[in-house]
Amino acid sequence: RKEVEQDPGPFNVPEGATVAFNCTYSNSASQSFFWYRQDCRKEPKLLMSVYSSGNEDGRFTAQLNRASQYISLLIRDSKLSDSATYLCVVPQVGRALTFGSGTRLQVQP
Amino acid sequence: DTGVSQDPRHKITKRGQNVTFRCDPISEHNRLYWYRQTLGQGPEFLTYFQNEAQLEKSRLLSDRFSAERPKGSFSTLEIQRTEQGDSAMYLCASTVPPTYEAFFGQGTRLTVV
């Protein structure tokens, strides 16, 4: 099993829709989790950090399910500008940061 | 600008040539990572440093790749005898424990012709 797995998508949703992505991880000892956003041909940028059960920032909500070893990212009221690739990152103590392959979101007018 | 900077932004080289990229992390960040990314894929880990010590290298990294961080500040990534399969975006990121929030440079896009 890969350390971090994501559904590559693409997720095609209309403006205003609610969309959710999941990211599964294999290391049950991981304590912190991150979602990054990456626009086409640009570098990844930190979107949200998750240190406990979840985090919310405006239209974005990240939730952690330790029992099933996944984190989710929920985007409400999708905007055209939300179109991007969303990368999940699960750090491991003393190890490198491992990225998922990313989930591509396309919000359509 | 106090972010992570990478140089050059673009590099075109002929197959068989050596190339070297530089990364300057955020000054107080003691961890520095190198990743490679191709279209449609997530960043693939290459290696990382804590201060000047190289702590981990990917098993996928061939002997043609070498990285240094001699004074625990900037880092260089060298690729010897480049191959067309080395064409990719090379990303550098830095963090400071205990948080693992990584900040990326804009990357170096390598094209091997």
Image (tube, coloured by chain):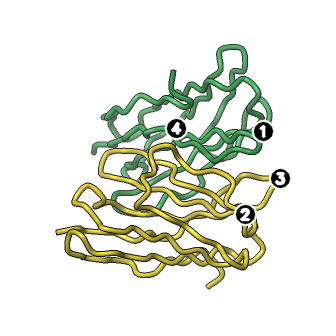
Chain under disc 3: B
Chain under disc 2: B
**Local crowd size for mark 3, using a 10 Å CA cut-off: few (<14), some (14–19), many (≥20):** few
Cα–Cα span, label 4 and label 1: 19 Å
A16 lies above or below B72: above
Q: Is residue A67 left or right of residue B37?
A: right
For the residue pair B25 and A20, the one nearer the viewer reads as B25
Tell me which label, 3 or 2, sits earlier in the chain.
2
Are labels 1 and 2 assigned to the same chain?
no
Q: Which mark is residue A51?
A: 1
For the point 55% across and 33% down, the residue is A74
Q: Secondary structure at mark 1?
A: loop
Q: Which mark is residue B53?
A: 2
For the residue pair A104 and B47, the one nearer the viewer reads as B47
Q: Position of residue B110 (x, y in %)?
A: 31, 69
Are the two marked residues, 3 and 4, in contact with CB atoms closer than 8 angstroms?
no
The amino acid type found where label 4 is placed reads Ile
**Local crowd size for mark 4, using a 10 Å CA cut-off: few (<14), some (14–19), many (≥20):** many
Residue at mark 4: A75
